[in-house]
Image: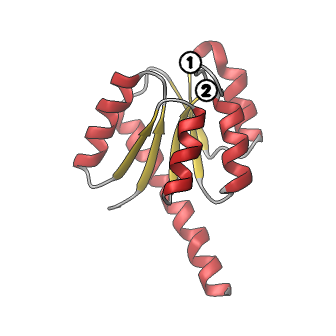
Amino acid sequence: MEGIKVLLVDDEIPFITTLGKRLAKRGFDVTEAHDGEEALAAMEQREVEVVILDVKMPGMDGLTALYKIKQQWPMAEVIMLTGHASMEAAIRGMELGAFDYLMKPVEFVDVLYKIEDAAARYRLHLAKIEQAG
């Protein structure tokens, strides 16, 4: 699925830099943010189909960012990244409207497939809205 607009949000800069490069090589349109505030600012600037959002970050945590994203951009699909210690947060994220969650450390192929699934759902919803309108 070409051209998926992805926002990567994590305070672990080497992780999202590497992930972003690997996704870009596959034709994804990648933007990076290092905390919740940067993520919201990035979403103000451009359309985002899928957000990869870390739960634990300094400042605005992932759950707060998820809540704000879903308030302003309800169609954006959000995939939460979590460690074992924050499994409850991932479940709470699902309750707040996250598409799914991935456990760290995460395999690239798992991220890739999850993004593609989330983007397919985003595009299906968009097509239904366009047909209805």
Q: Residue at x 59, y 15 (%)?
A: 84
Q: Quadrant of residue 53?
A: top right
In the image, residue 71 above or below residue 2: above
In which quadrant is the C terminus drawn? bottom right
Mark 2 Cα-neighbour bin, 10 Å: few <14, some 14–19, many ≥20: many
Q: Residue at x 59, y 44 (%)?
A: 40
In the image, residue 76 above or below residue 15: below
Residue annotated with mark 2: 55
Determine the secondary structure under disc 1.
Answer: loop
Mark 1 Cα-neighbour bin, 10 Å: few <14, some 14–19, many ≥20: some
Pinpoint residue 80: horizontal percent, then vertical percent.
58, 35
Q: Quadrant of residue 55?
A: top right
Pinpoint residue 89: horizontal percent, then vertical percent.
70, 25
Q: Is residue 93 left or right of residue 15?
A: right
Q: Is residue 96 left or right of residue 58?
A: right
Farthest-out residue, left: 25
- Earlier along the polypeptide chain: callout 2 or callout 1? 2
Tell me the kind of residue under disc 2.
Val
Residue annotated with mark 1: 83
Pick the residue in front: 60 or 51.
60
Farthest-out residue, top: 85
Circle on res. 56: none
Q: Quadrant of residue 124?
A: bottom right
Pinpoint residue 6: horizontal percent, then vertical percent.
44, 49
Pick the residue in front: 84 or 77.
77
Pinpoint residue 106: horizontal percent, then vertical percent.
43, 26
Tell me the kind of residue under disc 1.
Gly
Q: Is residue 59 left or right of residue 48?
A: right
Query: Is the residue under label 1 in contact with that under label 2 (CB below 8 Å)?
Result: yes
Q: Nearer the viewer, mark 2 or mark 1?
A: 2
Q: Residue at x 69, y 57 (%)?
A: 74
- Distance (Cα) linking label 2 and label 1: 8 Å
